[in-house]
Image (cartoon, grey):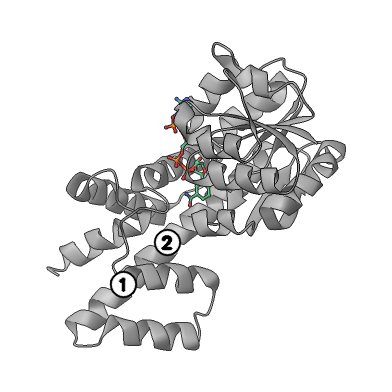
Amino acid sequence: MRIGFLGLGQMGHAMAKNLVEAGHDVTVWNRSPGKADDLVAAGATRAERPVDAAQGDVVMSMLADDAAVEAVVFGDGGIAGAPALHVGHSTISVDLAERLAASGAYVAAPVFGRPPAAQAGKLFVLAAGDPGLVERCVPLFDTIGQRTFRIGAAPATANLVKLSGNFMIMAAVEAMAEAMTLAEKGGVDRHMLLEVLTGTLFGAPVYQTYGTILVEDRFRPAGFAAPLGLKDMTLADAAATRYRAPMPLLGIVRDHLRATIAVEGEDVDWAGAALAVRRGAGL
Ligand code: NAP
């Protein structure tokens, strides 16, 4: 397939690389052009503007936030009105997903999985949109991911699932941070606590992945930067207001992210929200 790929950050670069290696004809664009260099060396074509990457069958985007997606779609040299089907992988607001769907053929396909999963082609893809359009993209989703979920016909529903899931990750981090802080203050090693919990009742991937980050203090380099995590909690809050769904726990995790960014800086992983819990207990 002739594919365009917009956004070569931690996630997008790995996804585009897998598409190039799978033999697709890939045209890449990134705001900072240097991040495309190794992909071009591996056989991709460099686009000067986003629209130049949207002349084939599909154009995939993996950008930081709503502002980035708006710039790349509706801004100068943007892809609005271009022939390729737009497949949006970024974690964006429900409202922007609706605007994108109203402006042309659009499939929402946000993903679960951190950069190592993206590199390994093991993401989980949450796809929503016209079923015919979604099926057209499945071979691409099979290249970047291990499983595709077909969420529904309205693209924004996939973004709502993604935001719900990211809220639950942060809630799990909060719960683990509180339990580890309690155990540690009471003289129990946090490695031991995690071994017991993941070996008994809490064996789910989220506890294993984030529990390991917490016990090993692996907050830098950030696999998912705390400011992007804060962005997602803010988007979840906007959806909660829209749908009149009280989410008191969301307020706690969002504030712990704010506190962590204020103290640690912008380059800390979002799991660093645990540091706000520890600090509150004097650790
Ligand atoms: P990242 O490494 O910070 O990359 C962000 C990308 O967006 C870069 O290509 C950046 O371009 C581009 N960008 C930012 N602002 C822009 C603007 N105004 N105009 C054009 N391009 C702009 O972020 P990431 O970790 O890959 O995350 C990308 C998306 O995936 C986010 O929506 C995130 O929430 C989501 N996500 C991340 C993870 C994870 O674990 N990291 C997992 C699932 C989903 P430059 O290179 O020029 O800065």
Q: Residues within 10 Å of mark 1 (few under 14, many from 20)?
A: few
Q: On the rendered structure, is 120 left or right of 10? A: right
Which residue has dot 1 on it? 216
Find residue 121 and report its horizontal and vertical position in percent.
64, 56
The quarter of the displayed image where residue 17 is located? top right
State the residue lying farthest toward the top.
76
SS state under label 2: helix
Q: For the residues marked 1 and 2, what is the alpha-carbon distance in whole angstroms?
A: 19 Å
Is label 1 within 8 A of ligand 1 (CB to nearest ligand atom)?
no
Q: Which sits in the foreground, 100 or 60?
A: 60
Tell me which residue sits at (76%, 37%) in the image: 129
Q: Which mark is residue 171?
A: 2
Using residue 34 as the reference point, say whether residue 262 is left or right of it: left
The residue that appears at 48% across and 35% down in the rendered structure is 35
User: Callout 2, which amino acid?
Assistant: Ala
Q: Is residue 209 visible?
A: yes
Q: Quadrant of the N terminus?
A: top right
